[in-house]
Structures are given as C-alpha cells and as structure tokens.
C-alpha cells in the first residue's frame, strides 16, 4: 500500500485539501534544531535514552521496513563506541527528502556529529507536526490515518518548489 513512495503517500487527496495544509510552512522545518523545550516528553526521553527516540523516528521514516527494536539496538551499539551519528544522519537525510526540507543549519552529517540529541528531537517533532506519532510505530499510524481518513502532508518526489 505504501511501497517505495514518500513516507506518507496521498491517495486520492492532495496536500492542499488537508485541514492542516495551511498551517505548516512549505519546504521549511516546523521547529528549530534547538527547540527541544517544545516537546518535554521527547526531550527527556532523548536525553535519557536517545536510541529509543531515534528508533521510533527511523521506523516512521522508513515506513516500517526497519523495526524500532532493530534500529534502537544498532544505535545503542554504535553509541557505545561513539559512532551512533554514522547510523543517524542518513535517517535525517531521508526525512528531509520526504518533506523537501532544507539541510539546515549545516549538513546532516555535521548536525548529527555535534548535536545528535537535538537532531533526534527535531526530527521527532517534525514527524509529529506533519501528522505522524513516532511513539506508536508505523503500523499504528497507518491504522490511525485509515480510521480518521486523513493523509498526512507530503511532498511528492520530483515536485519543484
């Protein structure tokens, strides 16, 4: 059903037809890198166990093809040797591509090297602001969207801004 398209595949409904389409900035992050205080839950969770927050984001960004458990264990293992950013920055790149977000404030690689917790928090907030709840997982989000007959906002690959 969701194949290899963007994270959130619109089926029969355009982005502009969604009730929250006018509320989100087009082609911009909805929160800043250092706006961790905007979601205290994700901020605390990421401060204590960043591998959990990261894993929840990865499951959504990859449309459930990478399980939360696997992503979390890989992130945790790489964290023990100080290299979790190697696994984390490609996920940020994928998230940005899905929503046509700019590579700000610097390249994804550098954001995750120097600000991994802030980057993970920002990515989680972005998913939430765009209609996905990383804490419930991919399948639960798909069920929720089907039940509510809502398609979260997307940017279709190939669109020119």
Image (cartoon, rainbow, N blue to C red):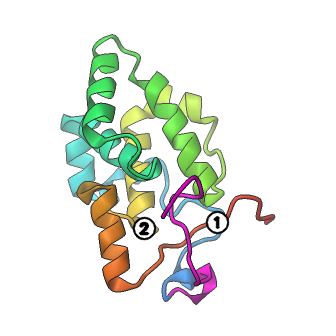
User: Residue 40's x, y, as percent?
Assistant: 23, 56
User: Residue 8's x, y, as percent?
Assistant: 51, 65
Position of 113 compared to 26: left or right?
Answer: left
Q: Residue at x 64, y 65 (%)?
A: 155
Going from N to C along the chain, the mark reached first, 2 or 1, is: 2
Question: From the viewer's perspective, is the residue at label 2 or at label 1 nearer?
Answer: 1
Q: Give the dominant element type of the magenta stretch: helix, strand or loop.
A: loop
Which residue is denoted by mark 1 in the rendering? 155
Q: Which residues are magenta?
A: 1-18
Q: Residue at x 36, y 67 (%)?
A: 142
Is residue 5 magenta-colored? yes
- For label 2, the crowd category at 10 Å Cα-Cα, with few meaning under 14, some 14 to 19 and many 20 or more, is some
Q: Is residue 58 above or below residue 143?
A: above
User: Residue 19's x, y, as percent?
Assistant: 49, 89
Q: Which residue extends farthest top?
A: 81
User: Residue 15's x, y, as percent?
Assistant: 60, 79
Is residue 66 magenta-colored? no
Q: Is residue 87 above or below residue 32?
A: above
Report the disc number at residue 129.
Answer: 2
Q: Nearer the viewer, residue 83 or 56?
A: 56
């Amino acid at each position: 059903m969701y194949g290899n398209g963007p994270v959130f595949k619109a089926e029969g409904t355009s982005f502009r037809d969604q009730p929250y389409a006018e509320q989100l900035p087009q082609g911009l992050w909805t929160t800043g890198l250092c706006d961790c205080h905007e979601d205290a839950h994700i901020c605390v969770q990421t401060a204590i166990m960043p591998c959990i927050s990261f894993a929840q984001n990865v499951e959504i960004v990859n449309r459930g093809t990478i399980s939360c458990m696997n992503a979390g264990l890989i992130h945790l293992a790489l964290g023990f040797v100080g290299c979790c950013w190697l696994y984390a920055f490609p996920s940020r790149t994928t998230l940005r591509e899905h929503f046509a977000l700019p590579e700000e404030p610097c390249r994804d690689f550098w954001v995750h090297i120097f600000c991994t917790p802030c980057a993970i928090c920002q990515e989680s907030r972005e998913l939430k602001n765009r209609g996905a709840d990383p804490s419930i997982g991919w399948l639960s989000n798909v069920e929720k969207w089907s039940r509510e007959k809502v398609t979260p906002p997307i940017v279709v690959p190939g669109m020119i801004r």
